[in-house]
Image (cartoon, grey):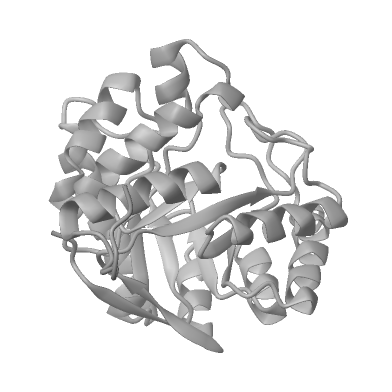
Amino acid sequence: MHSRHIIPLPRRDPLILGERALIMGILNVTPDSFSDGGRHAAVEAAVAHARQMVAEGADIIDVGGESTRPGAEPVPVQEELDRVMPVIDALMAEGIGVPISIDTMKPLVADQAIQAGASIINDVTGLQGAPEMAEIAALYEVPVVAMHWDRERDRSVPIVEAVRVWLERSREIAVAAGVAADRLILDPGFGFAKNMNENYALLNGLDAFAEQPLLVGTSRKSMIGRLLNVPPEERVAGTVATSVLGYTKGGHIFRVHDVRANREALTVAQAALYGPPQQEELQP
């Protein structure tokens, strides 16, 4: 069963985590992301894609201006700001209707994005890359996603335990900075410094984190591509399988490229676990 959490958002209704899975639609405004680099770099294209994802069932739009694919070059702060800020401004002007998350490792980018209207920080360094990130989340009273990404971990420690210990450190950093306990979302970091066996062991062991707000991000990743021997654009079915499995293990939020396929699959999974919505007349 899914744990229930109410996560306050500034200027918006809270996120309700529980039986219904939430979809975080990926909006990469980068030239080099592994799956969709360059497709939505222009503001008009980014806004159109965000609008499409909301129409398909996205509950959150996650805007990112720096690729975290293996081998990606770091992006200077100003260049990242130049990529993400016009898109956030345009989404806010449009009244996109769902919360915006800023996917960044840089505190200044997070600060500017929140001031422009973003409601969530998504930090792939788990608040352990830049100590100011937790302070910014506390200052603006926004939720923060803390992801596991430990490139120097002891490989003899089972992956679920290694992730648990790392994220406990992220929790301690958040609390020390003043981030409210109900504003911390954990992400086990599929694909980040993990081999295929570790990724699938982590997926199978997600219920170890099920009492906490939990984000699952497996979309189109190499754990699927290498298993099926398919390129990123052909990993939709594999992604859907991981989303459904992650949901049955207690996942709450699913960060995906392909919103409709994942929304439909998770709706069916929810009906299987908790029963379909009440209807006056059942259709065949």
Disc count in the image? 0
Q: Is residue 165 above or below residue 161?
A: below
The answer to whether one can see residue 214 in this image is: yes
**Where residue 77 sits: x, y (%)?**
74, 56
Q: Residue 271: which quarter of the image?
A: bottom left
- Establish if 269 lies above or below 99: above
**Residue 187 vertical placement versus 142 (above, below):** above
| Quarter placement of the N terminus | bottom left
Residue 9, visible in the rendered structure: no
Q: Residue at x 44, y 28 (%)?
A: 237
Q: Give percent across and percent down for residue 33.
A: 67, 35
Q: On the picture, is 106 further left or further right than 218?
A: right
Identity of the residue furthest to the bottom in this view = 11
Q: Residue at x 58, y 39 (%)?
A: 68
**Image quarter of residue 279:** bottom left
**Residue at figure coordinates x 56%, y 89% from the top left:** 11
Q: Nearer the viewer, residue 52 or 14?
A: 52
Q: Residue 49 placed where, x, y %?
A: 72, 52
The residue that appears at 35% across and 28% down in the rendered structure is 194
Q: In the picture provided, is 125 more to the left or to the right than 89? A: left
- Position of residue 101 measured from the top left corner of the image (x, y, whole percent): 57, 65
Residue farthest to the top, as pictured: 229
